[in-house]
């Protein structure tokens, strides 16, 4: 998918000239003093690459980041993160040359993808293998072979390695079939990479039963790279009906394919794995699980994986839990979605009759089915993932019966899709979004998310600088959601619907049919003079909310109220920054009218700071 233009770069450049402008990322020093910079140069003499040109990056706290190549660089002091572009750094230090971004010295996020701190307490921990004799290798890299690994997995319950002091890569010529009749642990000790060489899937664990097997495959402290699932049973496009489904029926799970077995991934890395594409059902660039009672991922990193759907992970009828993990630069590269009926009536389909589309949903994680249970995402980061259709980062369709989904203390930044830049979630009841931040996500419509038939409970969360480029809802698109939902202490700032006349509702589009309390809508703008700039045509219900500005950015007409009885006042919000806590936030100034204007707030704010619940600050930050 061609990336859309990003007008929010102009917003970055305006930080120093418009103190109250809604900003995506805080530039805490727009022009550092010479003496301060000299002190930094003296103290920090090394630089580490954190992004290539065009990518987003994240940094811990406030750091000095430079942009350029060779001996030509521009430097900025950055809080939280930014984008490796000339727009962000307000110039091009070396025209016509591929550039990168580097951070001074060593910091927590000094790498091409961000790291996730141990924010949430996971339900599982690594298996203690310290007393297990190594089953692969005799102390040298040469002794750690594919044959030795195959033998160990076939004959041992716990597989560990003795390959010497330095990291080792074991290249695989074909998939290793993991036994399904017992629990198996594979522990790489932070030194082992299993490499599919871009030719073969790495591990396969398949039973023909359905959601019945309690045996567990645990992968811990190991890297799985360049696995490839080859597609089979290809269905060609129908020249008479382009809506008919086409593509591969099989070829899921580029690194790991699991069916009817539990999978636990702890402190592992999956990079550059590929599932087959295109296809309406196939996917899971790194991991695919079908009919599994549990897939739990903790403290792991997924980067550069791709597949028709679920660029990193695809779960079908499988329970999913994701803790303290990073998903960056994964891609769902199918096209046309996956749907039944309508224009696809009469089509033979790939997986079933009357099927349309060839995938492209869920850049990082895709989940669907009718028998899976609650899904939890906690303390995780989704950065720069992309989908050609729905959900740049995370998609879930809970078929038939609604189920619970929880997104807690997580960051969604710079993800892109046609619809739902970060999220597309359907039939989640309840859908709890708590203490999470959505920033710089882009889609044609629903810049951050589209919610369909969900019971929303959005609390202490921030939507900043998301964009709808050719549709409605710079931040959120709401469709047919449960009126029993609620939104409480949420900050919407600097979101855009930038398509021009006819494109509106920069913060919330659709039906706002549930109450909103203690929330702020600040500087969410469109380029349309005739329609509501920030929210829906019909104001929602609620209390103790604040909106700004009073008039539309184009044409100057009075803007429609987001919520009945809302107060118009400049909230004096700061830029998105690291203000403490696990996710970036936009803090109000000491003189902000938001302070003390809220009532019945949650006991703590988005950062975890305690509140006076009876007289608290409007928005996500106390």
Image (cartoon, grey):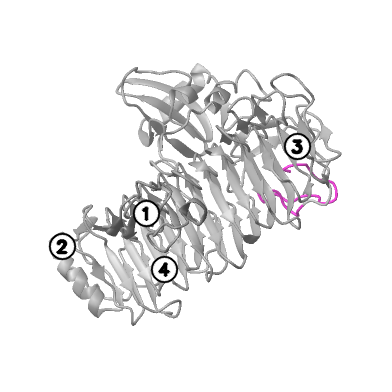
**Left or right of 432: which side holds 258?**
left
Query: Rounded to the nearest whole Å, what is the CA distance between mark 3 and mark 4?
Result: 42 Å
Q: Earlier in the sequence, mark 1 or mark 4?
A: 1
- Residue 231 quadrant: bottom left
Q: Earlier in the sequence, mark 2 or mark 4?
A: 2
Label 1 SS = loop
Q: Mark 2, mark 4: which one is toward the viewer?
A: 4
Label 2 SS = loop
What secondary structure do most residues of the magenta stretch adopt? Answer: loop
Label 3 SS = loop
Label 4 SS = strand
Q: Earlier in the sequence, mark 3 or mark 1?
A: 1
Relative image position of residue 12 (x, y in whole percent): 55, 25
- Residue 457 quadrant: bottom right
Q: Is residue 360 above or below residue 254?
A: above
Which residue is painted at 80% across and 30% down in the image? 569
Which residue is painted at 21% across and 55% down in the image? 199
Label 1 sits on residue:
279
Q: Which residues are magenta?
A: 602-622
Q: Earlier in the sequence, mark 2 or mark 3?
A: 2
Query: Rounded to the nearest whole Å, what is the CA distance between mark 3 and mark 1?
Result: 38 Å
Residue placed most toward the observer, 498 or 374: 498
């Amino acid at each position: 998918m061609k990336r859309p233009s990003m007008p929010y770069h102009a917003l970055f450049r305006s930080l120093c000239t418009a103190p109250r402008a809604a900003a995506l990322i805080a530039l805490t020093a727009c022009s550092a003093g010479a003496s301060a910079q000299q002190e930094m140069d003296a103290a920090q003499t090394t630089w580490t690459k954190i992004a290539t040109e065009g990518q987003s990056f994240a940094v811990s706290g406030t750091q000095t980041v430079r942009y350029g190549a060779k001996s030509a660089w521009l430097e900025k002091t950055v809080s939280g993160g930014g984008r490796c572009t000339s727009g962000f750094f307000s110039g091009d230090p070396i025209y016509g040359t591929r550039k990168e971004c580097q951070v001074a010295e060593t910091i927590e996020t000094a790498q091409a993808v961000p790291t996730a701190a141990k924010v949430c307490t996971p339900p599982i921990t690594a298996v203690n293998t310290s007393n297990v004799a190594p089953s692969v290798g005799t102390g040298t890299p040469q002794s750690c072979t594919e044959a030795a690994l195959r033998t160990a997995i076939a004959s041992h319950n716990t597989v560990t390695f003795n390959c010497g002091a330095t990291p080792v890569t074991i290249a695989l010529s074909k998939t290793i079939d993991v036994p399904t009749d017992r629990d198996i642990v594979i522990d790489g000790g932070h030194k082992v990479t299993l490499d599919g060489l871009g030719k073969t899937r790495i591990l396969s664990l398949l039973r023909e039963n359905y959601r019945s097997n309690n045996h567990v495959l645990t992968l811990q402290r190991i890297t799985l790279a360049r696995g490839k699932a080859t597609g089979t049973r290809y269905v060609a496009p129908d020249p008479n009906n382009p809506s008919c489904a086409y593509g591969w029926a099989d070829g899921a799970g580029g690194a790991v394919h699991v069916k009817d077995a539990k999978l636990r991934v702890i402190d592992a890395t999956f990079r550059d794995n590929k599932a087959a594409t295109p296809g309406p059902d196939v996917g899971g660039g790194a991991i695919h699980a079908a009919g599994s009672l549990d897939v739990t991922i903790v403290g792991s990193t997924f980067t550069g994986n791709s597949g028709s759907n679920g660029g990193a992970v695809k779960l079908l009828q499988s329970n999913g839990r994701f803790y303290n993990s990073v998903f960056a630069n994964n891609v769902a590269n199918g096209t046309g979605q996956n749907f039944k009926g309508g224009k696809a009536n009469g089509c033979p389909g790939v997986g079933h009759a009357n099927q349309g589309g060839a995938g492209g949903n869920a850049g990082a994680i895709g989940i669907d089915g009718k028998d899976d249970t609650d899904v939890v995402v906690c303390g995780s980061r989704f950065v720069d993932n992309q989908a050609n259709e729905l959900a740049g980062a995370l998609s879930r369709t809970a078929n038939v019966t609604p189920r619970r989904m929880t997104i807690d203390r997580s960051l969604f930044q710079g993800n892109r899709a046609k619809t739902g830049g970060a999220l597309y979630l359907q039939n989640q009841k309840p859908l709890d979004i708590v203490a999470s931040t959505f920033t710089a996500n882009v889609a044609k419509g629903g810049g951050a998310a589209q919610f369909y038939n969900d019971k929303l409970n959005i609390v202490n969360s921030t939507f900043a600088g998301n964009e709808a480029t050719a549709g409605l809802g710079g931040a959120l698109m709401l469709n047919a959601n449960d009126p029993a939902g609620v939104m409480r202490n949420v900050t919407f700032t600097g979101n855009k619907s930038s398509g021009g006349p006819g494109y509106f509702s920069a913060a919330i589009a659709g039906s706002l049919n549930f109450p909103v309390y203690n929330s702020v809508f600040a500087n969410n703008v469109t380029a349309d003079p005739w329609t509501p700039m920030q929210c829906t045509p019909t104001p929602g219900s609620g209390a103790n909310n604040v909106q700004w500005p009073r008039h539309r950015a184009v044409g100057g007409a009075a803007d429609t109220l987001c919520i009945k009885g809302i107060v118009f006042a400049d909230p004096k919000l700061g830029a998105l920054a690291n203000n403490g806590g696990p996710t970036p936030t936009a803090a109000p100034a000491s003189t902000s009218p938001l302070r003390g204007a809220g009532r019945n707030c949650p006991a703590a704010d988005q950062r975890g700071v305690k509140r006076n619940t009876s007289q608290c600050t409007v928005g996500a930050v106390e």
